[in-house]
Image (cartoon, helix red, strand yellow):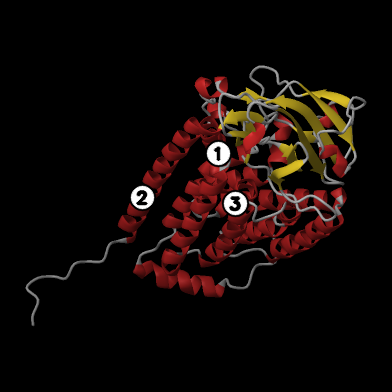
Amino acid sequence: MTSNGPSPAAPSADATQRNLVIGILVATLVTWVAVIADLKTGGRPDPEPLRAASTLLDGPWRFHTGDDPRWAAAATGDSGWETIDLTALPGSHDGDVGLPDYVGGWMAHGYPGYHGYAWYRRAVTVPADATAWEILGPTLVEDGYELYWNGRLLGGSGRLGPDPRLVGTRPLRFALPADAAGSRGVLAIRTYMRPGTGASADGGGMHTPPILAPRPVADALHRAQWRRTLAGYIVDAIEPAAMLAVIGLALAYGRRSGRKGFLVFACLALALTAARRLNNAIVSWTDLQDLDTYAWLASVMWVPTMAAWLLAWNRWCLRPWRSIDGAAIVLAMAGIIGALTDSAGWTSVCRLGSLALFVVIGARIVRSGPMRVLAGLTLASMVAAQFGAELLDTIGVPGIWFPFGIGVSRTQYIYAIAVPLLAILIARTVLPRATRGRVVQRERKSATPAVGP
């Protein structure tokens, strides 16, 4: 059958690039609006009627370092214990999520440098005007806790004992016994801080007091606590999802790209970066990962991530330098040694050496690389995200801001710009069919990296 007209032409590379860029910008704007809305909702203070109907268990608590199961019992004499006041200053919040009612831990109350077990106790009067009462557990504890009512274990965060398994503290609620209404009992909290972990001057133990509330009020307060916790780490979930979307973009258009070598290592680097960022949400929202695993991954994962980014950007110019590839691998080995041996010296060598290599790559891109302005801005933003301590701390840029009362780190702000820039850069590498063959031939000729300058 003969066609009555010319067949539709395939979309040009310019049209494809334009459509991709528009789609990336729209998706970025929609994501920003959704995240801002979530931060605004999560950052709202607890409704005053709920707080008025509940009792914040702040004020003086009896405190004792060490560990003895008998200290959970109501009959235990604690008159000789120290006293810690858990009354927060008005408007106080933690320096990460923005949790309200924040107080300094035991290291700010006469126990600097102490790690291990410690107990808190206080008498609590439960009103008789409701039949069901609950304790909303402290929302920030270093690092785990168990909560007891008159010697009875109600639950806790993590697993304490001879082989503790510690997880991120999440909003938890514990039902008091049915006969607690109208009585006076002893609330005891057993806490544990991991030995050998770094801590601030106000670290250790409880940083927010529990709340006593009747069940309907406890339900609403628990939901408000979870909204705040979800908002506190929503960016750590959204940005990894965006990074995976960029990987999908690279895979979908990789065959039509003029920078295949760059895309291969950029996808690897994005996957590693996404895993690092997502770990924060996983450990804060779930019990799937314990704190020891989280700390180990945080100390090790940045090394292959840094190396993958170096190998990727070294291939933005068609002839990557073999010397940069070799130096990146050597520095990665130094970084692994530093992470496994907890050596600040080896870690510093890896970070400063990698930063120097990024500077060299950036100079190459600015001097002779394609799309030098867009590529230079994208590289600069990625480097700023990876080297905040070296580049931003020194000029006084705060590490975290609190829009709407929820903490958002400067790294999260930078990735909110860097990831869309990278997606646009990848979209701009899509080539028309006529040009693609010449680029493939050129890439084959330059497949062997140049030694260097």
The image shows residue 339 at horizontal and vertical percentages of 80, 55
Alpha carbon separation for disc pair 3 and 1: 18 Å
- Residue at x 78% of width, y 40% of height: 151
Q: Name the residue under label 3.
A: 278
Query: In the rendered view, does 277 fall on the left or right side of 342?
Result: left
Figure quadrant of residue 252: bottom left
- Please, what is the three-letter code of the amino acid marked with disc 2? Gly
User: Foreground residue, 311 or 136?
Assistant: 136
- Please, what is the three-letter code of the amino acid marked with disc 1? Trp
Instruction: Say what secondary structure mark 3 lies in.
Output: helix
- Residue at x 74% of width, y 50% of height: 166
The image shows residue 272 at horizontal and vertical percentages of 62, 58
Q: Nearer the viewer, mark 3 or mark 2?
A: 3
User: Badge 3: few (under 14), some or many (20 or more) residues near its Cα, within 10 Å?
Assistant: many
Figure quadrant of residue 209: top right
User: Foreground residue, 412 or 170?
Assistant: 170
User: Foreground residue, 61 or 266?
Assistant: 61
Q: Mark 1 points at which residue?
A: 226
Residue 146 visible, this orientation: no
- Mark positioned earlier in the residue sequence (3 or 2): 2
Q: Which of marks 2 and 1 is in front?
A: 1
- Mark positioned earlier in the residue sequence (2 or 1): 2
Quadrant of the drawing holding the C terminus? bottom right
User: Foreground residue, 376 or 212?
Assistant: 212
411 lies above or below 56: below
Q: Mark 2 points at which residue?
A: 23
- Please, what is the three-letter code of the amino acid marked with disc 3? Leu
The image shows residue 15 at horizontal and vertical percentages of 30, 56
Residue 353 visible, this orientation: yes
